[in-house]
Image (tube, grey):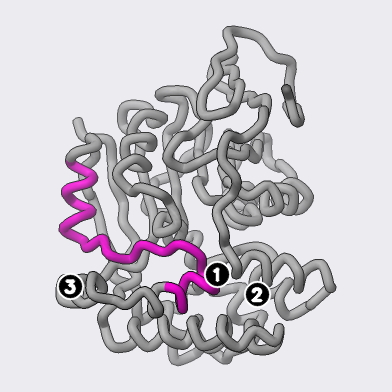
Amino acid sequence: MFESCHSDQEFSGKATLRGGFLYFCPGSTLSVWEVSMRSSPRSLPYFDILLEQLQQGDETVRQVFGRHVHWGYWSSPETADGSARDFSLAAERLAQQVYAGARVQENDSLLDVGCGFGGTIASLNESYGALQLTGLNIDSRQLDRARQEVKPRANNRIAFVAGDACRMPIPDASMDVVLAVECIFHFPSRRDFFHEARRVLRPGGRLSLSDFVPIAVYRFLQRGFSAAGEAFVAGTYGRVDSCVTLADYRALAAEAGFTLTEQRDVTRNTLPTYPVVRDVFARAGNHPAARATAAVGLLSKLGGLRYRILHFSVAE
């Protein structure tokens, strides 16, 4: 039974059921009929906190996380002033850093996986024209906000679609660019995601993402991480897999049919994020979340976790 239906155009062509969704591919555009999901959204406690604060009209949370829900990027970290306004600009810059490496151009079809509140889609919508933009997320609450906040401009077309990153309701070879901004650590399987990204990309397609990537020694220590430690982080950020090294990424890419074309370590440029996010959680009265954020920040400062932006292209 259909739960909902949304489309910006008339449907034509053959319909196919995939991943719990009925989709059409009329020409070069994508239209989606959403049907009941087979799996429930994964637990992401920090989104529960943010959505509650947004509903209560918290202006600081709106500035910090009302558009983008990821870390910030400062070209000169020493200039960060800790304000909500400064952080919102930095979060915008981080999204731009990720999609700039994907060489986005007019008439591209672009898929943003784990799109959150639609911030990256909004940024692309404001910066380019004649794009087909699709945001994919497993949490309907996030998609509801994205649909409310992001409206197409400059001859762009925008669709927000519910679905699993490892089982995308997207037609084969329908995208020029796939993005995953600071979300891949939540996915059930990076391997499955890479294969799905390759499936939906056209020849010459590009994949760009950002992730917390451990150094090899830290990954060894992580494997001995106690269940209590894992629960400490999961209590705020949900299921997080930060055990995939840069070498692992190269292997995953090669197996799925990608080439790693560029990687940048921007850890230093993201460090001013941690006190801002910690304070947001503390103001909300969630001190465990504030402590978990501070712990991740310490690991990054010590060099165990590196924040990297990775760009891949479909192998020739």
Q: Main secondary structure of the magenta part?
A: helix
**Crowding near pointer 2: few (<14 within 10 Å), some, many (20+)?**
many
What secondary structure is marked by label 1?
helix
The stretch drawn in magenta includes residue 252: yes
Residue toward you, 229 or 189: 229
Query: 81 above or below 148?
Result: below
* Residue 69 rendering spot, x and y as whole percentages: 58, 65
Identify which residue, 65 or 283, lies in the foreground: 283
Name which residue lies at 18% across and 41% down: 254
The C terminus - image quarter: top left
The quadrant in which residue 134 appears is top right
Residue 263 vs 14, above or below: the answer is: below
Q: Report helix, strand or loop for mark 3.
A: helix
Residue matched to label 2: 64
Q: Percent from the top left, x then y, of residue 138?
A: 58, 46
How far apart are the alpha carbons under marks 2 and 1?
8 Å
Which mark, residue 220? Answer: 3
Residue 228 — which label? none
What is the C-alpha distance between the residues marked 2 and 3?
Answer: 34 Å
N-terminal label among 1 and 3 = 1
The x and y percentages for residue 5 are 75, 27
Local crowd size for mark 3, using a 10 Å CA cut-off: few (<14), some (14–19), many (≥20): few
Q: Residue at x 59, y 26 (%)?
A: 21
Can see residue 219?
yes
Question: Which residue is rendered at x = 37% and y = 50% of the image?
Answer: 208
Residue at (55, 15) in percent of width and height: 16
Is residue 99 shown to the viewer in this render? no
In the depicted structure, whether residue 25 falls above or below residue 144: above
Query: Which residue is labeled 1 in the image?
Result: 91
- Sequence-wise, the earlier of marks 2 and 3 is 2
- What range of the chain is rendered magenta? 231-254
Dot 2 and dot 1 residues touching (CB under 8 Å): yes
